[in-house]
């Protein structure tokens, strides 16, 4: 997905097995953020920052949905532990991460593996990608402010 692309109507299934559709967010801008893994330090910092500033994001017309390749059970634990007030898409088939181009080869401590690149897509009320905040730009502890400061 690139800026200007139309996002698919069906995004996936959330932590409760419910279908998440673009039309669920009609009239709002959607913050669709992809993150590597539930319960890891960076992903927890990012999710909690979005949680703590959700009222500011909502006031600015945003809805928030997270997505990772973790399963629904993992998402349920993550949401419960950190009291996350938004849904997380369980993209276990890697359909969404591949469609958005955020799945690929990564490297840590010299070891290569495949994973999700931390990326946030800002989707306007017409379902068009308006902004992309890429992996090297995201500040996990200040992500909501990054979204709001450029809106």
Image (cartoon, rainbow, N blue to C red):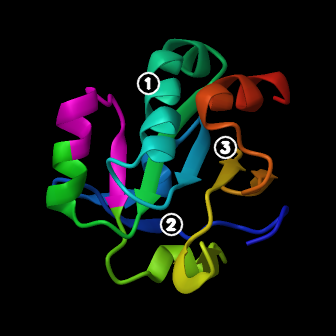
- Circles 2 and 3, Cβ within 8 Å, touching? The answer is no
> Does the segment drawn in magenta span residue 114?
no
**Residue 97 higher or lower than 124, as above or below:** below
* Snapshot quadrant of residue 112: bottom right
N-terminal of the pair, mark 2 or mark 1, is 2
Q: Secondary structure at mark 3?
A: loop
Percent position of residue 18, x then y: 22, 58
N-terminal of the pair, mark 2 or mark 3, is 2
Alpha-carbon distance for marks 1 and 3? 21 Å
- Which mark is in front, 1 or 3? 1
Q: Is residue 38 visible?
A: yes
Percent position of residue 10, x then y: 44, 68
On the rendered image, what quadrant is the N terminus found in? bottom right
For the point 28% across and 56% down, which residue is it?
14
For the point 36% across and 59% down, which residue is it?
89
Q: Secondary structure at mark 1?
A: helix
State left or right for residue 59 relative to residue 96.
right
CA neighbours of label 2 inside 10 A, class few (<14), some (14 to 19), many (20+): few
Magenta region: 78-89
State left or right for residue 36 relative to residue 90.
right
Q: Is residue 17 visible?
A: no
Q: Secondary structure at mark 2?
A: loop
Residue 125 numbered tag = 3
Percent position of residue 144, x then y: 64, 27
Residue that label 2 marks: 9
Alpha-carbon distance for marks 2 and 3? 12 Å
Residue that label 1 marks: 51
CA neighbours of label 1 inside 10 A, class few (<14), some (14 to 19), many (20+): some
């Amino acid at each position: 997905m690139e800026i200007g692309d139309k996002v698919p109507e069906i995004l996936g299934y959330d932590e409760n097995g419910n279908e998440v559709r673009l039309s669920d967010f009609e009239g709002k801008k959607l913050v669709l953020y992809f993150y590597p893994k539930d319960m890891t330090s960076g992903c927890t910092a990012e999710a909690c920052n979005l949680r703590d500033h959700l009222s500011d994001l909502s006031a600015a017309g945003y809805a928030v949905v997270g997505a990772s390749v973790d399963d629904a059970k993992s998402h349920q634990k993550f949401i419960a532990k950190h009291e996350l007030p938004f849904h997380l898409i369980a993209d276990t088939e890697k359909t969404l991460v591949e469609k958005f181009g955020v799945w690929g080869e990564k490297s840590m401590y010299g070891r290569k593996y495949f994973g999700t690149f931390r990326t946030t897509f800002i989707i306007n009320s017409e379902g068009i990608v308006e902004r992309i905040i890429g992996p090297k730009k995201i500040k996990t502890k200040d992500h909501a402010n990054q979204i709001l400061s450029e809106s």
